[in-house]
Image (spheres, rainbow, N blue to C red):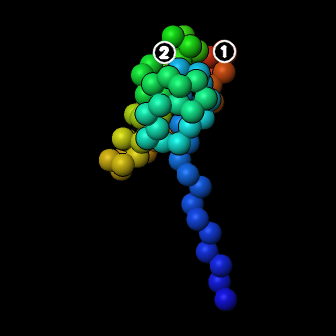
Amino acid sequence: MTTQGKAAPDLVLCRQCLRYVFDGTAICPHCSGNARQIGDRYRDGGYLAIETMQRIDRLRENAGAPVETAEISGSPPSA
């Protein structure tokens, strides 16, 4: 007998309080704010830039283009 498990639910950051909520959540259960509206903490913390880079990677992957991953660090890569 084989046992099949369920896939884990997709979690995303609330764009107000930066706590995880289920993907598609409109009102955050933690801060009662609009979980989809970009707040100052989200933007200033660099999360918007990271989200944009991940979206570009997904689009490239879906288009069949090779996706190179780079480690994010405080210093540029050495040549």
Q: Nearer the viewer, mark 1 or mark 2?
A: 2
Furthest residue toward bottom: 1
Q: Is residue 51 above or below residue 59?
A: above
Q: Residues within 10 Å of mark 2 (few under 14, many from 20)?
A: some
Q: Please state the horizontal and vertical placement of residue 54, each as a whole percent of the image.
A: 47, 34
Q: Secondary structure at mark 2?
A: loop
Where is 74 relative to 54, above or below? above
Q: Nearer the viewer, residue 69 or 23?
A: 23
Q: Earlier in the sequence, mark 1 or mark 2?
A: 2
Secondary element type, mark 1: loop
**Circle 1 sits on which residue?**
75
Identify the residue at horizontal 47%, vertical 31% (top origin).
Answer: 27
**Image point 37% across, 41% down: which residue?**
60
Quarter holding the N terminus is bottom right
- Amino acid identity at mark 2: Gly
| Left or right for 64, reference 2 | left
Q: Is residue 53 visible?
A: no
Pick whichever, 56 or 1, lies toward us.
Answer: 1
- Give the residue displayed 59% in from the left and 55% down from the top: 8
Residue 44 visible, this angle: yes
Q: Which residue is mark 2?
A: 39
* Neighbours of disc 1 within 10 Å: few (<14), some (14-19), many (20+): few
Residue type at tag 1: Ser
